[in-house]
Image: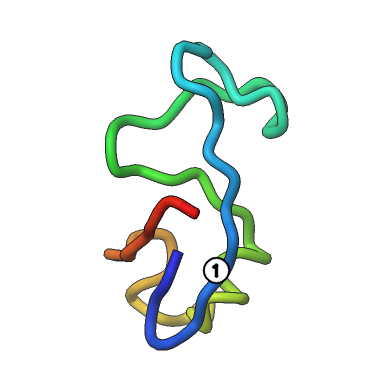
Amino acid sequence: MDHNNASIKYRKQEEGLHVHVDHAYQPLCMNNIINASKAVWTALGVSEDSPDWGWLEITWSDA
């Protein structure tokens, strides 16, 4: 994922699962929604007081 010239690697969950095994079995997100931790937001350079915190347009590519 890329945002503001910051880039992180994100592992896509397998399609067909109904919960995130690695995220306390939370329900899957809708299309184009990513359930990300505070560490991901920080790595992308988004501060907690930013209006982008928790909702952000990103770009990504398959590796």
Depicted 48 relative to depicted 30: above or below: below
Residue 30 screen position, x and y as percent: 32, 30
Colour scheme employed for the rendering of this structure: rainbow
Q: Residues within 10 Å of mark 1 (few under 14, many from 20)?
A: some
Residue 37 screen position, x and y as percent: 62, 54
Q: Residue at x 32, y 64 (%)?
A: 59
- Label 1, secondary structure: give it: helix
Depicted 47 relative to depicted 41: above or below: below
Left-right relation of 30 to 2: left
Farthest residue to the bottom: give it. Answer: 5
Q: Quadrant of residue 22?
A: top right
Q: Locate the N terminus and report the quarter of the image it occupies.
A: bottom left
Depicted 27 relative to depicted 51: above or below: above
Q: Nearer the viewer, residue 53 or 6?
A: 6
Q: Residue at x 42, y 87 (%)?
A: 5
Q: Residue at x 35, y 73 (%)?
A: 52
Q: Residue at x 52, y 13 (%)?
A: 17
Residue 4 screen position, x and y as percent: 38, 85
All told, the count of numbered labels is 1
Left-right relation of 30 to 16: left
Q: Amino acid at mark 1?
A: Trp
Residue matched to label 1: 41
Residue 15 screen position, x and y as percent: 45, 20
